[in-house]
Image (cartoon, rainbow, N blue to C red):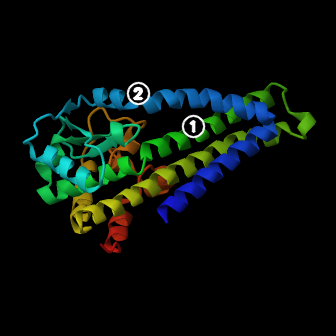
């Protein structure tokens, strides 16, 4: 169901892009925006893992006797995945993320705080969640969604600029006021869809993790603990650009209800409730 939902949302984003591009700049306008934004996201897709690991000062775990390394190895084998690299982030706030453009280049990173706070079964469930992201190619999915949403924003910016400076697209029946309104509304709609894609992938990873470890209970407990800590303090050096990567939004303490539409994560309460319905 989550795969179908993700596909529908990506198709909706694509339709939005083609419609906006056709209205303003035709096929050429759409193609130019896609090439510009796609180039930036192509670079991010191949190199963002190195950047984010360096940003959070993550240290690779090479000690094969460490229990986290052994957990990752055992769960990767069970999930029929190549052994990902394992990193420890030297921070006390508990959290974790996965990165890497495909399973062959997968990375699982956990904070020291997560290792210290959670019991072994909860740590295992968090790792299973991150491995699910790798197995589902969620980094690729997120890059595609970001590329399309970024192209929509780029076209909308050109649209707004053209409307204000006389490029009102009269030959297509465009009107400056309509163009400005579309330039404001459509990027917001694209952002909402992009965030919905992200939340959908979180639900899918939660369910896959519960099935991989054989029970949803430990992940439910882990999510509750992680959410509680995230609301007490921010992860050091956390950025909005990388927040979507973490199992719990590092800015959870700043969230309020009306911002949920624009959140990269479902509410922890909803995730726990969804997990309670998983049958393994």
> What is the CA distance from the residue labelled 1 to the residue labelled 2?
15 Å
Q: Position of residue 252 (x, y in %)?
A: 34, 49
Q: Mark 2 highlights which residue?
A: 47
Q: Tell me where residue 49 sits by quadrant.
A: top left
x and y percentages locating residue 168 in the rendered image: 85, 32
- Left or right: where 174 falls relative to 19: right
Mark 1 and mark 2 lie on one chain; the one further toward the N terminus is 2
Circle 2 Cα neighbour tier, 10 Å, few/some/many (<14 / 14–19 / ≥20): few
Instruction: From the viewer's side, name the closer residue of 260 and 62.
Output: 62
Q: Is residue 265 above or below residue 139?
A: below
For the question of whether residue 160 can be seen, the reply is: no
Q: Residue at x 80, y 24 (%)?
A: 165
Q: Return the residue nearer the eye: 61 or 95.
A: 61
Where is residue 143? Give x, y as percent: 50, 39
Q: Could you tell me which residue is drawn at 44 percent across and 54 percent down?
A: 201
In the picture, residue 109 is in which quadrant?
top left
The answer to whether residue 69 is visible is yes
Q: Residue at x 49, y 66 (%)?
A: 1
x, y percent for residue 262: 50, 49
Query: Which part of the image, by quadrant, shows the C terminus?
Result: bottom left
Mark 1 vs mark 2: in front: 2
- Please indicate whether residue 181 sits to the left or right of residue 130 in the image: right
- Name the secondary structure under disc 1: helix
Q: How many marks?
A: 2
Secondary structure at badge 2 equals: helix
**Residue at numbered disc 1:** 147
* Side (left or right) of 227 relative to 136: left
- Asked if 144 appears above or below 275 in the picture, the reply is above
């Amino acid at each position: 169901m989550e795969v179908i939902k993700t596909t529908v949302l990506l198709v909706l984003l694509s339709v939005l892009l083609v419609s906006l591009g056709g209205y303003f700049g035709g096929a050429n306008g759409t193609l130019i925006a896609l090439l510009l934004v796609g180039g930036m996201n192509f670079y991010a897709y191949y190199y963002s893992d190195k950047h984010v690991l360096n940003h959070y000062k993550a240290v690779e775990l090479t000690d094969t006797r460490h229990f986290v390394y052994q957990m990752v190895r055992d769960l990767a084998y069970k999930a029929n995945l190549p052994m990902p690299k394992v990193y420890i982030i030297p921070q006390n706030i508990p959290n974790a993320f996965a990165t890497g453009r495909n399973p062959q280049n997968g990375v699982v990173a956990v904070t020291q705080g997560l290792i210290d706070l959670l019991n072994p079964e909860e740590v295992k469930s968090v790792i299973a969640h991150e491995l699910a992201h790798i197995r589902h190619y969620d980094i690729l999915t997120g890059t595609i969604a970001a590329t399309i949403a970024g192209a929509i924003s780029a076209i909308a910016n050109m649209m707004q600029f053209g409307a204000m400076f006389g490029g009102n697209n009269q030959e297509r029946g465009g009107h400056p006021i309509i163009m400005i309104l579309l330039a404001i509304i459509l990027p917001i709609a694209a952002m909402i869809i992009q965030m919905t894609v992200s939340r959908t992938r979180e639900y899918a990873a939660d369910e896959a993790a519960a099935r991989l470890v054989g029970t949803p209970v430990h992940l439910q407990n882990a999510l509750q603990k992680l959410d509680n800590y995230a609301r007490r303090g921010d992860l050091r050096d956390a950025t909005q650009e990388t927040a979507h990567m973490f199992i719990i939004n590092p800015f959870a303490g700043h969230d309020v209800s009306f911002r949920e539409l624009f959140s990269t994560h479902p509410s922890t309460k909803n995730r726990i409730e969804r997990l309670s319905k998983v049958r393994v």
